[in-house]
Every structure is written in structure tokens, then in C-alpha cells.
Image (cartoon, rainbow, N blue to C red):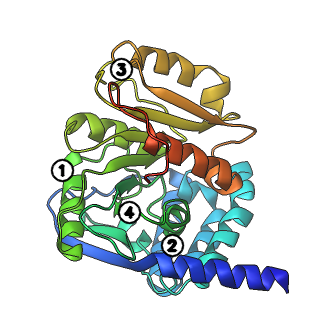
């Protein structure tokens, strides 16, 4: 009984904070091109696309996890991820705001280059031109609903713009993110604040590149479960706020790769920061939600070089 009451209070609290989750489309000439798949995944695509057009995202993701090559996973990763994702989709089904939001996966897995851009946008109750803004770049496999749902819990008072960009956003153009921000501004009826740019996994690679393509467009960069690509490590500047959050058991952490790359980043951006989630692997958002939320909020509250420190409560 206590659990039921707690769940009811929790869901009611979330409903009070999130006023709307909107699905946006806009004309675009720079949407993601059709991307190639490994041979074992290629043969599954027709059935996968058909399923995306007829079944809920939760069912499709469950099926895809039984054929993990479609999502760029191995069997072990899929086994770890499946129960964590299932719990997240149960919460989505119980959410008045999220349960009716259309999946972005059919767009991401299009068999031709789209002529429109696409994004989901979380708009909290009482949102205004002063609201803090996040642009979130999804990981490999497409823009899953659970990404934004998780972020809505971690950052319920933020406007969150979550563009969809094909299967892998590792090389998405900064102009595409600018289009998404403009579309979100039109939808809410006011110009959004300069956003923080957050990228996950392959989206972390893309976020690094987009951040450097348009250095004035974003307040800061936060990479989750990703490291800076080699083509970016010497291009960050002293004035930029750059943060990397990763699981301590990630192969690129245990090998020392992230530390080595970060040392190079710090030759031009000395304040670049790294936070490790203890005893966590690539899926720490789901397996260690409270630790991830704390690390994310800390990165969002961190002052730029030369700025006074904050108490961390303004987000």
C-alpha cells in the first residue's frame, strides 16, 4: 500500500511539473542521411520498420533487444539493458504526458533521407523565456522515448529539446541543432535561453563536434558515456565549460583512454572536468540514476572560468 501511495504521489508530482511533451517537425535539408548497418542487422530492417509503423515503441525495443545488432549492442549489453529499459517503459505508460507521445524511431530508421527535421520537447509548467534549456543528443540506435522521460525526472524544471538524427548522431551538423532550437522557440512562443548541450554515447561524439562548430550557440558541453573524438581534443578553448561523465567500468575509462584524452583537452581548456559514476558501465543513466542525476546537475551548475561559484540550486 505504501508503495502504491508513493507511486501515486510521484506521478502526480511529475504531472504538475511537466506541462507538455511536444513532437515537432520542420522543413530541413540537413536531416540525417540513411545510414548503413552490419550485414546481420540489414536483413532484419524491413520487418523492424514494419513493426515501428504498427507497434508501440516499448514492444519494438523489446524485440530489438533480442536482436541487439540492430541497436549496436552485443548479447551481454542487451541482457543488462533489457530489464532496465522495461522498467522505464512501464513508467512512460503510466505518465499522462509521455504515454501519448509518438515514437521517433520510425523517423530515425527511415529508408530515405527525411525532408524534415524532428524533435521532442519537454515544456515544464510555468516555462518562460528565463527557463534553463537543454539540447539533448541521443545515442546510437535512434531517439528512444525513455531518454527524454529519464531527463524529465532529472531536470523537471528545464525546457529539454531532444532532436532526432538518424541512427547515429556522431557527425550531426550544428545547424541541425539550431533548426531544432528555432522550432522549439516557435512552439513555445518565445526565444529560448542559450542551451547547455548534452550528448549521450555516440551523441556525445556528435555533441563535441557540434559544440566546436558553433561555440557561441551553447552555454556548456556535457558528454555522457562518451569521450572526446580525436578531431576535437585540441580545439576546446579556455572560456568553454566542458564536462565528461562516465561509468567507472567503461572500457575507455579502465584503459585510461578518457584520462589521456582529457589531459590533451586541458592543454587548451584547463577547467575541463571528468566525473566517474562508481561501479557503473555504459548504461549508468538507468542503473545508477541518482548518482547520474547528481553528476549532471553538478555539471550544469559549475561556473565558467572567471565566474563566481554558485550554490548549485539555480537549476
Q: How far across and how far down the image is residue 134, in percent?
A: 37, 55
Mark 3 vs 4, N-terminal side? 4
The residue singled out by tag 1 in the image is 175
Quarter of the picture containing the C terminus is bottom left
Mark 3 vs 2, N-terminal side? 2
Q: Nearer the viewer, residue 307 or 272?
A: 307
**Residue 48: assigned label:** 2
Q: How far across and how far down the image is residue 41, in percent?
A: 53, 58
Mark 4 vs 2, N-terminal side? 2
State how far apart marks 4 and 2 are (Cα): 28 Å
State how far apart marks 3 and 4 are (Cα): 27 Å
**Residue 2: assigned label:** none
The quarter of the displayed image where residue 24 is located: bottom left
State how far apart marks 1 and 2 are (Cα): 30 Å
The residue tagged with tag 2: helix, strand or loop? helix
The residue tagged with tag 4: helix, strand or loop? strand
State how far apart marks 1 and 4 are (Cα): 18 Å
The residue tagged with tag 3: helix, strand or loop? loop
The quarter of the displayed image where residue 277 is located: top right
Amino acid at each position: 500500500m505504501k508503495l502504491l501511495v508513493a507511486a501515486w504521489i510521484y506521478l502526480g508530482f511529475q504531472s504538475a511539473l511537466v506541462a507538455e511533451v511536444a513532437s515537432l517537425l520542420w522543413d530541413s535539408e540537413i536531416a540525417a542521411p540513411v545510414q548503413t548497418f552490419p550485414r546481420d542487422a540489414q536483413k532484419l530492417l524491413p520487418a523492424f520498420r514494419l513493426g515501428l509503423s504498427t507497434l508501440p515503441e516499448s514492444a519494438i525495443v523489446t524485440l530489438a533487444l533480442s536482436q541487439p545488432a540492430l541497436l549496436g549492442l552485443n548479447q551481454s549489453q542487451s541482457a543488462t539493458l533489457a530489464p532496465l529499459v522495461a522498467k522505464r517503459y512501464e513508467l512512460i505508460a503510466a505518465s499522462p504526458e509521455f504515454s501519448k507521445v509518438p515514437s521517433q524511431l520510425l523517423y530515425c530508421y527511415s529508408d530515405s533521407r527525411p525532408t524534415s527535421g524532428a524533435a521532442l520537447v519537454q515544456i515544464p509548467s510555468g516555462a518562460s523565456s528565463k527557463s534553463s534549456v537543454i539540447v539533448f543528443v541521443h545515442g546510437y540506435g535512434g531517439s528512444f522515448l525513455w531518454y527524454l522521460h529519464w531527463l524529465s525526472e532529472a531536470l523537471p524544471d528545464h525546457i529539454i529539446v531532444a532532436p532526432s538524427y538518424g541512427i547515429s548522431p556522431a557527425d550531426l551538423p550544428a545547424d541541425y541543432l539550431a533548426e531544432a532550437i528555432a522550432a522549439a522557440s516557435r512552439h513555445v512562443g518565445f526565444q529560448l535561453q542559450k542551451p547547455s548541450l548534452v550528448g549521450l554515447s555516440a551523441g556525445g561524439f556528435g555533441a563535441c563536434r557540434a559544440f566546436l562548430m558553433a561555440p557561441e550557440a551553447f552555454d556548456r558541453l556535457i558528454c555522457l558515456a562518451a569521450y572526446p573524438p580525436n578531431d576535437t581534443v585540441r580545439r576546446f578553448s579556455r572560456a568553454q565549460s566542458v564536462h565528461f561523465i562516465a561509468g567507472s567500468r567503461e572500457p575507455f575509462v579502465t584503459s585510461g583512454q578518457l584520462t589521456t584524452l582529457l589531459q590533451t583537452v586541458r592543454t587548451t581548456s584547463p577547467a575541463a572536468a571528468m566525473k566517474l559514476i562508481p561501479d557503473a558501465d555504459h548504461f549508468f543513466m538507468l542503473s545508477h540514476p541518482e548518482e547520474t542525476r547528481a553528476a549532471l546537475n553538478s555539471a550544469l551548475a559549475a561556473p565558467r572560468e572567471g565566474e563566481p561559484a554558485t550554490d548549485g540550486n539555480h537549476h
